[in-house]
Image (cartoon, rainbow, N blue to C red):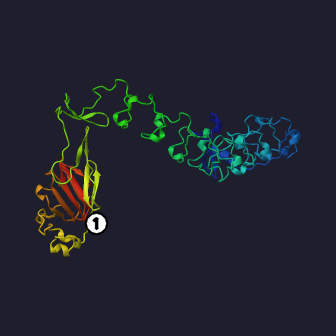
Amino acid sequence: MAKRISELPAAGAVADTDELELNQAGTSRKGTRAQLVAGLAAATHVHTLADVTDAGALAAKDQVLEADIASEAVTTAKLADLSVSSAKLALEAVATDQLADNAVTASKIAAGAVITTKIAANAVDSGRLADAAVTSMKIADGAVTTAKIGANAVDSNQLADDAVTDPKIADDAVTAAKIAASAVGSTELADNAVIMAKIAGNAVSTSKIAANAVTATQLASNAVTEQKIAGGAVTTAKIAAGAVGFDQLADEAVTASKIADGAVGSAKIAADAVGPVQLANTAVSPGVYTVATVMVDPQGRITAASSGTAGETNAGVNAGVDGVGVFAGKVGVDLQFRHIAPGSNRVTVTLNGDDIDIDVVEGNLQIPASNVTGLAAVATVGTLAALTSLDADGRSFSNYRSNQGTRTAVNYTVLQGDSGSELVATGSGPSTWTLPKLLAGTQIVVHNLRTGTITFQANEVTLKGQTGLAADKTAAVIWLPGDVVKLTGELS
């Protein structure tokens, strides 16, 4: 059964979603409260103050002017949210005391509205500036003072090339860490700039010191310590005369090899220091010698001793009957001997150590054949060379043995059977001939036709004179008593 509206229960608070019954163009329909309100808001309603019957002093006025508003009449409660636009505010109409604390938020300030005069001095601090907001054009020329630049803020990227000139660098500002490695060369250093205080300890290495630059003047007293002296560097010339005394010598430093021959004189030997142990043994056997023959060297040492027979009277005797004897006679205890002198310029007599050398001067032997009688015809018509195979009667020499003439071996040892022979050495290069112990009176003639020198080597004999026979030279080799071998002739 249908009810009248008056019969319906009263509604509570009306919501926008509540539905209402409508007659729309003769058809019943439903609509929400929100649709109705939206329809009312869209309608245009224009009213003037004259339409308001209770406007009082504002009656007949179309707008409220500043003079119509009483002082402090517009309170916060009278202002609708977002109702005060820039157009409603007169220039500088809102003073700081009209604004509530924190009333002007970022969204209330128009773009570009905050000009320079609106910003209090020192009001914009680092927290108000956006990152990278202060660009180059925002900074006045000369505005960036030393105090405005953060410590270590200016690095090489901020500096223009050649920007840091001499007057821009503070005194003592260029420390060692600011100088690139190898940046300071000899051109950058002022003359005499590197003083002692500027050189780090151990900085002057060997390669930094010029040759011969460190003289005695540059060395401090006691600067040359033991470890600074290279092994073997202190030569004789570096030690001052008399500098090495008793204190400088280590114990037992003076060994036998360090003492020069003859350097230890009598004054250097302590009394009674030389006993039997210090004396070197000689070849003399200890014992008692009677009628002794003693050999003493220049140092007074007995080097040989032998016993003789007492009571024997000795005298010099010339053996043989031919010629002239060398022994002249005895005067007191002296045995006197005659001199051996050359009878002509064809012979020379020379003292050679313990030997008396008698030699023929070949150049003075040329005798004209016409001055010689009794020679064979071959000699009187020929030359001295024709006599090489004949004796005075024209017969062959008995000591010439041509069948033993040539020696082709590189090295050769002379045999007793070679005595009286002329030996011819042939071949190339040097050669060694050994001279053994042979009978006294043995003699040979050696012709060296090799291309090198023959070296004579003694074996159990004493070799006198030179020991080499040069190429294309001739020498006589003679064995003398006492196993002495003598070389004479064209030795070199």
Judge whether 106 appears above or below 447 on screen: above
Q: Nearer the viewer, residue 234 or 67?
A: 234
Camera sees residue 411: no
Quadrant where the N terminus sits is top right
**Number of numbered labels in the structure image:** 1
User: Residue 449: x, y in percent?
Assistant: 21, 66
Camera sees residue 403: yes
User: Residue 276: x, y in percent?
Assistant: 27, 26
Q: Nearer the viewer, residue 33 or 217?
A: 217
- Please tell me in which quadrant of the rendered image residue 54 appears: top right
User: Residue 28: x, y in percent?
Assistant: 60, 48
Residue placed furthest toward the top: 272
Q: Nearer the viewer, residue 12 or 29?
A: 12
Residue position for label 1: 363
Judge whether 390 appears above or below 144 on screen: below
Residue placed furthest toward the bottom: 381
Residue in view at x 56 percent, y 49 percent: 182
Residue in view at x 25 percent, y 56 percent: 358
User: Residue 98: x, y in percent?
Assistant: 80, 36
Relative to 387, is 92 on the left or the right? right
Dot 1: element: helix
Relative to 459, is 58 on the left or the right? right
Relative to 448, is 207 on the left or the right? right
Residue type of the residue flagged with mark 1? Gly
Relative to 422, is 257 on the left or the right? right
